[in-house]
Image (cartoon, rainbow, N blue to C red):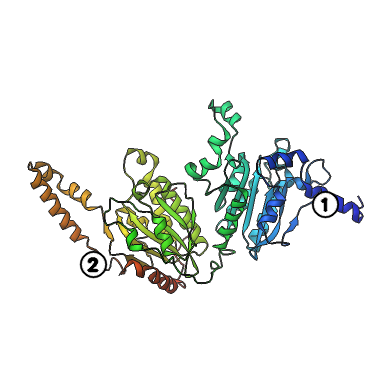
Amino acid sequence: MTLDGEALEQLRKRARAGGADKYHAANAAKGKLFARERVASLVDDGSFVEDGLYANALAEGLPADGVITGTATIDGRPVCLMANDSTVKAGSWGARTVEKIIRIIEQAYTTKVPMVYLVDSAGARITDQVELFPGRRGAGKIFWNQVRASGSIPQVCALFGPSAAGGAYIPAFCDVVAMVDGNASMYLGSDRMVEMVTGEKTTLEAMGGARMHCAESGVGHFLCRSEADALDVVRRYLSYLPTNWTQPPPAAPAAEAPTKVDLAALVPASERQAFDMRRYAKGLLDQGSFFEIQALWAKELTIGFGRLDGEVVGVVGNNSMFKGGVLFVDSADKATRFVQLCDAFNVPLLFLSDVPGFMVGSAVEKQGIIRHGAKMITAISEATVPKICVVVRKAYGAGLYAMAGPGFEPDATIALPTAKIAVMGAEAAVNAVYANKIAAIGDESERAAFVAARREEYEQDIDIVRLAGELVVDAIVEPHELRTELIRRFAAARGKDRHFATRRHGVTPV
């Protein structure tokens, strides 16, 4: 085929227009943008360079084969990206679709820049399965490339519609996933398939909707009200991470902490009274810099990025507002993945401890709490970025280990004057040691006096000054001094040796 300028322009126009008008209208009725509009809204003006525009150009009704791929900049920094076009056969994958996705991930990996996935796809085209599914350059190669790129370059997904069947693994292999409430979904089998195979009657929203994945399964990280919010999550997430694993996180101009936050007043004297560790983190970090991740899932643990004097840190904090801050299976997994993310991309870790320990009982034992706790402790051990443990109120039992306590080579263990470090709390310890004696005391007042005396002895045994004297903690710091102390200590640790062990890799207790 010989093309003159006008014919080439018409070919380009058809490819860029996407599917039929009725599909554009159907998407617009759901509040969905056209895929090219999403790309234009995300990247810097004029920066997008497209590859594969003419994929399947000779086929009828398959412009660009249903996926847009190319390079661009976001806030002046280079990225590679792909965007499913759901106006073309519902964004489903054909052989050229798969090849385009593979190529752009390979380019991101070899050029060492972040990879952005804008997903809205019904999955593979069954009619094209031989061409796209089983071969060396089939769909499996997408996931192989994602796994190879993991920890080498940031990978972030915004999910605007379905991500079905095998395609659901594209979000799963990303660092984080932003999902648009009401439209986004992830599932391995449709509701019809589930009923056919298992007899269960369900809906796509119930088993794979955005709210379920962000609040229950943990596969989603951000529940977004609109597509604009999801694109903003992508932009903000990348602002905290380096371009690749060899670089430091991007610094911002130094900023002050919120001036109206009294950190001392936030922490109640009584261990029985809860407080919100998110407010504490926000009061410690640069104004407006806290970027919480997975806010709706395993809320007893708070994670997210923030800045201290302009420098990026990753925050892991126990939140007693939810389940008393006790660590469960999901919160252990939540911490594990975030710690590994920070360690991969050179983000220092700040642990804010107010932890009673790991949950006990038959239910969590059957769920594998020991295995999941071991996984979290493995991640803490293997993390070689600068890490500082701050005992805000308490660190009991294995919770101390899980929050990067002294045995896990933190660059510092800092205690606030309110801090307690022990195998367990005073009440539990007295009951454990003196249960029989307490039960044998008939007089109520005598029994109360005996318990109070034993509690006092226990409190003296774990006195924070004694622990500082034994060099268990490196410093006792007043709350108003903590921010400055952390800025100085992280600065001092910035050039630390990152070697951990002589081996290929450990065997993770998954």
User: Going by the image, does 433 lie left or right of 359?
Assistant: left
The amino acid beneath tag 1 is Arg
Residue 106 location, quadrant: bottom right
Residue 298: % across, % down: 43, 47
Give the alpha-carbon distance from disc 2 to disc 1, as whole Å. Answer: 73 Å
Q: Which mark is residue 12?
A: 1
Crowding at dot 2, Cα within 10 Å, few <14 / some 14-19 / many 20+, comes out as: some
- Whether residue 378 is visible to the viewer of this picture, yes or no, is yes
Q: Residue at x 73, y 39 (%)?
A: 23
What residue is disc 2 on? Answer: 465
- Whether residue 384 is visible to the viewer of this picture, yes or no, is no
Crowding at dot 1, Cα within 10 Å, few <14 / some 14-19 / many 20+, comes out as: some
Q: Which mark is residue 368?
A: none
Residue 185 location, quadrant: top right
Residue 507: % across, % down: 45, 52
User: Going by the image, does 461 lie left or right of 114?
Assistant: left
Q: Secondary structure at mark 1?
A: helix
Q: Is there CB contact under 8 Å for labels 2 and 1?
A: no
- From this view, report whether residue 295 is shown above or below residue 290: above
Counting residues from the N terminus, which is met first, the one under dot 2 or under dot 1? Answer: 1
Please, which residue is most extreme toward the front here? 260
User: Going by the image, does 465 lie left or right of 248?
Assistant: left
Q: Residue at x 15, y 44 (%)?
A: 435
Residue 177: % across, % down: 56, 50
The amino acid beneath tag 2 is Val
Q: Nearer the viewer, residue 251 or 66?
A: 251
